Amino acid sequence: MGEICSPQFIKDLEEKCKKIRRTIIEMLAKAGSGHPGGSLSSTELVVSLFFVYLKHDPKNPRWPERDRFHLSKGHSCPVLYAVLAECGYFPPQELFTLRKLGSVLQGHPDRRTPGIEVASGSLGQGLSVALGMSLAGKLDGLNYRVYCLMGDGEMQEGNVWEAAMAASHYKCDNLCAILDYNGFQIDGKVKDIMNLEPLKEKWKAFGWHTIEIDGHNIKEVLSAYEEARLVKGKPTVIIAKTVKGKGVSFMENTVDFHGRAPNPEETKKALEELK
């Protein structure tokens, strides 16, 4: 952890996050639709994973020994597309075909996109899919890890807790759930629609190793991934407190930009703030 937590390393990752955020804004502005709020809130979580911890090969996306990443909150795919392009899975110019007819980059992920493991978008199902990947790895004797990024709104789905119970029962220590806990869902604040708290205690009760972090603090994010990697005999959940729309002042902590692309004036202002 020493070298990857050096000030320069952290600074480089922070700069990469800023670049990814600019790309998200540009993609959505070009498309004229999409979901900026949850994409911006999960940027540090996705960037830190793909550029530090995930074992993967952009030139061989179906490499059997690769770690698996599943984006359960599929509407936040702009952040994943931007990171995949930055890693070299496809040319960056493809990003500006987002949501166009015939593009490999649709409004929710599907397997036509290099680097996407499975389609997603129906909220609450991702952890079950990741659990299946985890169990398959153990049955096949493959030494890969599975990461599943979820939104807090989908914690309200019963399917999530069935998967959580099963993952603990089968001691899936190769499974890491990451919760982008930004406190908002499409209709308003999560706590007003269906309160999740006490969330940490609930995951613990389901037999998971539980870590709470500031999801925008790169050092805390890296430390959490390292801790998860070392846990044996149980799955790990990282509860990452984040800010919806992080990095763009007028998008932060508002549902207005949950699923709305910025107009030209807003795009200009957002890109100015992300310089």
Image: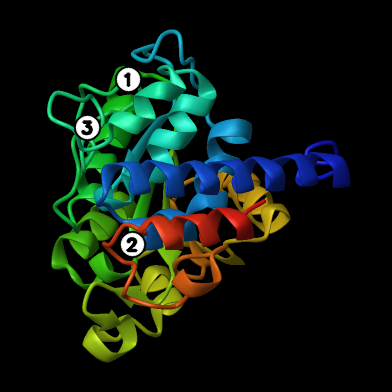
**Disc 1 to disc 2: CB gap under 8 Å:** no
The residue lying toward the viewer, choosing from 190 and 255, is 255
Gap in Å between the C-alphas at discs 2 and 3? 17 Å
Among the 4 quarters of the image, the one containing residue 106 = top left
- Quadrant where the N terminus sits is top right
- Crowd class of label 1 (few under 14; some 14 to 19; many from 20; radius 10 Å): many
Indicate the amino acid at tag 3: Val
Provide residue 160's location: percent of width, then percent of height: 22, 61
Whichever of callouts 1 and 2 sits on the residue coming sooner in the sequence is 1
Observer-side mark, 1 or 3, equals 1
Comparing 221 with 263, the one in front is: 263
| Inter-mark Cα distance, 1 to 3 | 11 Å
Image x and y of residue 219, in percent: 73, 54
- Badge 3 marks a residue whose secondary structure is loop
Q: Residue at x 21, y 42 (%)?
A: 108
Mark 2, other Cα within 10 Å: few <14 / some 14–19 / many ≥20:
many
Which residue in the structure is indicated by mark 2?
A: 151
Q: From this viewpoint, is residue 211 visible?
A: yes
